[in-house]
Amino acid sequence: MRRTSSAQSITSASRPRLILLVITLFFCGYFLGLSTKHLLVPGLPEPEDEVVQGTAVGKGKAVVVVDEFKAPDPNDPFRKFRGDTIHALHTSSGGDYQNYQTRIMYASFKLVQQMPGGEKLTGFTRILHRTVPDYLMDEVPTFLVKPVKPQCDGWCDYPVANRPHAIKAWFDAAAKDPSMAQGAWFFMLESDYVWMRPMQIPGSAWDPNVPGVQYLFDYIQPWHPNAVPSIKKLYPGDIKDVPSSGPAPVMMRFEDFMKVVPTYVQDSVRMEQDEDMKSKLGWVREMYAWDAAVAQHKDDVKLRTEHFPYSSTIVQPPFDVDLGQACMTHYTWGALYHEGIPSKGGKQVYRWEKRDIGRIEQTLKIEPIPMPIPFREGLFLEFDAPLTKPRHNLIVK
């Protein structure tokens, strides 16, 4: 019988153990390389973090999930709201003309609150500058302010003169009674807006790097030679600092309104005392007062001025062509359809104009607005502007 050497016996006995050792070393090396490949090969991503309820577990480094909109201090009445909440405000004299618009605007606000994202619309207040309450007090949340010009309860030459003081009165009152503040952002509006969808906010109100927003009006031109002398009386700096905007629509933080509004009031008072400024700036002079005030606070208030199609606030039918990024329409102009050019005698074939509405019966019982006639080529709007299909579609919307 053949004898086996001791060396052969050892080798035969150890072979399974060697195979097991090689397999173990292979997998250890594989998993070590897999976990460190982002260090060896430039450009490969680090292993992802697995996040469960705000805490990272497992593969990667621990991370904290931050809610950028979280209320900074639930116990602070001014900082208890999430940073994506909005308190809408608008001013009114309480006349039938504005009350008609207010009822439509507030009704559309409540409809939009029911849409996805509408829960961020957390407050609505009408700032009523009037000597006595009106008939919408029980329908629309209202803050009553004594007007500077009491005669504007009825007819007066410039009812807008009451707006700056009324806005200041509300913010002063809210500073004393924080329960009046119902959001992180404050959105100043006018009554002739219709809500179409929730507002696309610029970011968290609690992030100081996020600016507020306002709308650029083409007809507000502080740089115009006729306007410059008046603007310079209020703001002697670079005329380019003065935006082409107005006090609505404007969305800012509470503290930013508290900075700008007192200056806005002072500038508007100065305008009313200056006949030359009143003559040169006309009906929109109070909008210029706002713009001059914003310029004076350009270093301590972040505010972005937007225009269609980038406006997140309003569009203005019938001259804008679609809703773009806006959340509201502003019917400052009428929808007037003409067969032929209006300035050359074109026949008016459809009309809806807010200025035709001013009787109490129209306000108390709002009738459905008649739809425009079907679109066809060759129709014109006022100012001889051609009616295009996109313009027509926005009106119908």
Image (cartoon, grey):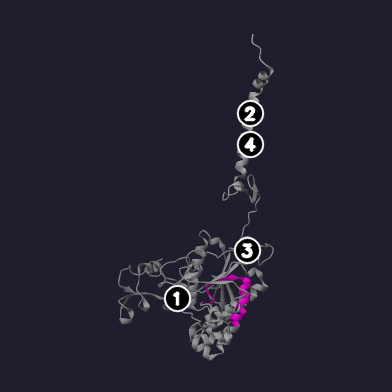
What range is drawn magenta here?
A: 245-265
**Which residue has dot 3 on it?**
81
Q: Amino acid at mark 4?
A: Cys
Q: In the rendered image, which quarter contains the N terminus?
A: top right
Q: Using the numbered discs, state the Cα–Cα distance from disc 1 to disc 4 in whole angstroms.
A: 73 Å
Expressed as whole percent of the image width and height from the top left, the position of residue 72 reads 66, 62
| Mark earlier in primary sequence (1, 4) | 4
Q: Using the numbered discs, state the Cα–Cα distance from disc 1 to disc 3 in whole angstroms.
A: 33 Å
| Mark earlier in primary sequence (4, 3) | 4
Q: Is residue 324 a member of the stretch shown in magenta?
A: no
Q: Residue furthest top?
A: 1
Residues at discs 3 and 2 in contact (Cβ within 8 Å): no
Name the front one of labels 3 and 2. 2
In the depicted structure, whether residue 119 falls above or below residue 266: above
| Mark earlier in primary sequence (3, 2) | 2
Which numbered circle lies on residue 20?
2
| Mark earlier in primary sequence (1, 3) | 3
Q: Using the numbered discs, state the Cα–Cα distance from disc 4 to disc 2 in whole angstroms.
A: 12 Å
| Mark earlier in primary sequence (1, 2) | 2
